[in-house]
Image (cartoon, rainbow, N blue to C red):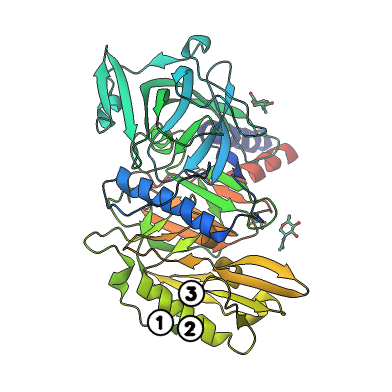
Amino acid sequence: MATKILLFFITLVVLFIITTQQNFPTSYRLERAFPVKHPIPISELIERDTFRHRRLLQQSGVVDFPLEGDSDPYHIGLYYTKVQLGTPPRDYHVQIDTGSNVLWVNCKSCNGCPTSIRQHIPVEFYDSSSSSTSSLITCSDSLCSQASQWSECSKSKCTFRFQYGDGSGNSGYYVSDLMHLNTMGVDSGSSNSSAKVVFGCSTSETGNIRTDGVNGIFGFSQHSMSVISQLSSQGVAPDSFSHCLVGSGNGGGILVFGQIMDPNMAYTPLVQSRPHFSVNLQSISVKGQTLSIDPSTFSIPGNQEGTIIDSGTTLAYLPQDALTLLKDAISQAVSQSAQPVISREDGCYIFTSSVSSIFPLVSLNFQGGSSMHIRPQDYLLQDNSKGGAEVWCFGFRSYLTPGPTVLGDLVLKDKIIVYDLGGQRLGWSDYNCSSSVNVSSTSSRGRGGSSTSFPMLILASILQYAFNI
Ligand SMILES: *[C@@H]1O[C@H](CO)[C@@H](O)[C@H](O)[C@H]1NC(C)=O
Ligand SMILES: *[C@@H]1O[C@H](CO)[C@@H](O)[C@H](O)[C@H]1NC(C)=O
Ligand SMILES: *[C@@H]1O[C@H](CO)[C@@H](O)[C@H](O)[C@H]1NC(C)=O
């Protein structure tokens, strides 16, 4: 009997190991392109965001809005991480971009690629001839036709060409190679796995494409060419990913394939068929009082874009009318304790108490009735402090011409953000992103169909139980 029980548990353990081996959540440490406590003037942050939004929207052919200035080297992504590709594996530092579709890295003999790189990031060019697992994607490959929007055939190679709003662009061809997945989960069981992914090998860059400082871009969209879609359709990763961005110190954070778990997660549906991760923002409340904003103003007139969730944007952007109402309500709430700073740009305050004791809680209310509660430090940016007084300025901004409503890093930090592609919803929960996280690799593939669950914590306790026997 005891032997039978033991056998049963061993079988269970083996089964779990087999089913979860390839499904351990993969995690990536994120680094911020510039520290949170940056000495960068707000006007430069806005310029950087404007450039990004123009690029985001032009890429999807949504809208054109004017751009001025163009001088900052960190225009595309705010976060970067390291991925390992090929056999033997080599490291590539890539910008994380939830606004683009594919993973691409600069390749050997690239024409016009940056040869100098930021401080501690080494220049690395992918070389298919020095990876034993590299293969070319041919025109007959099904992934080539899925990418047909930007691909064409050239001497039987499946090539790509990306063109950005400012006239810059890059081109190259698709290859397939092993991506090494740094797996997390049960401490002792941490293992390395790898999976074949198709990615772009960039052989030419024109104009100021602004990948200076990194080796490529890691796109995280819902398109079938994105790595997350490829891995989830292979059954290697769940069809979801999450991040937790640290709001203090040097920033940084964690990005995982899978859902970071928290009992207080709130969800709202993703807007369907959008190129970006968009949700429906319906109202804004200050101290529980809902402002009288027409919900339709949160969308660009004529398109149902919704509110874009974008970790690559530094600040947050609202339509002009909504922003005015929000600022008025906040300035009324703090009129007794904080002085507007007249000499500066609009929206700065000077005060001597702590920011969280004076400024009210703001709630962003989404479709489905869930709210994201944002603290003063999620809508204000500290500008400086002198002689016991602090100056904080509004980090919520608007464009002069109608632009997208975008929630960037300012709002998304210190929260778990879950992009549940299978469930077509976005989840969030306040969280200390410096502490450890629990991750579920539950997959809801099939968009509403049956869900497969690989509970890692159960795996851990079963292992322990088996050894105790
Ligand atoms: C996983 O792979 C990396 C790089 O190839 C290596 O440094 C690390 O030691 C490996 N970890 C395990 C648990 O095998
Ligand atoms: C967040 O977690 C880290 C690591 O566990 C801890 O050192 C830090 O004090 C925590 N911060 C807050 C605000 O609780
Ligand atoms: C993770 O899961 C364990 C076991 O369920 C629980 O005790 C722990 O509090 C969880 N940690 C977090 C950060 O949610």
Q: Residues within 10 Å of mark 1 (few under 14, many from 20)?
A: some
Decide: marks 3, 1 in contact (CB < 8 A)? Answer: no
Placement of 358 over or under 226, stated as above or below:
below
The quadrant the C terminus occupies is top right
Decide: marks 2, 1 in contact (CB < 8 A)? Answer: yes
The x, y position of residue 32, in whole percent, is: 60, 46
Q: Secondary structure at mark 1?
A: loop
Q: Is mark 3 within 8 Å of ligand 2?
A: no
Query: Residue flagged by tag 3: what amino acid is it?
Result: Ser
The x, y position of residue 213, in whole percent, is: 56, 34
User: Which of the marked residues, 2 or 1, is nearer the chain's N terminus?
Assistant: 1
Q: Nearer the viewer, residue 59 or 8?
A: 59
Q: Secondary structure at mark 3?
A: strand
The x, y position of residue 464, in whole percent, is: 70, 41
Decide: marks 2, 3 in contact (CB < 8 A)? Answer: no
Query: Residue flagged by tag 1: what amino acid is it?
Result: Leu
Q: Residues within 10 Å of mark 3 (few under 14, many from 20)?
A: many
Label number found at residue 70: none
Q: Which residue is mark 1?
A: 291
Q: Secondary structure at mark 2?
A: helix
Q: Residue at x 57, y 71 (%)?
A: 344
Query: Residue flagged by tag 2: what amino acid is it?
Result: Ala
CA distance separating discs 2 and 1 = 8 Å
Q: Is mark 2 within 8 Å of ligand 2?
A: no
Placement of 177 over or under 373, stated as above or below:
above
Q: Which residue is mark 2?
A: 329
Label number found at residue 363: 3
The x, y position of residue 401, in whole percent, is: 32, 63
Ligand 3: which quarter?
bottom right
Find residue 134 and report its image quarter. Answer: top left
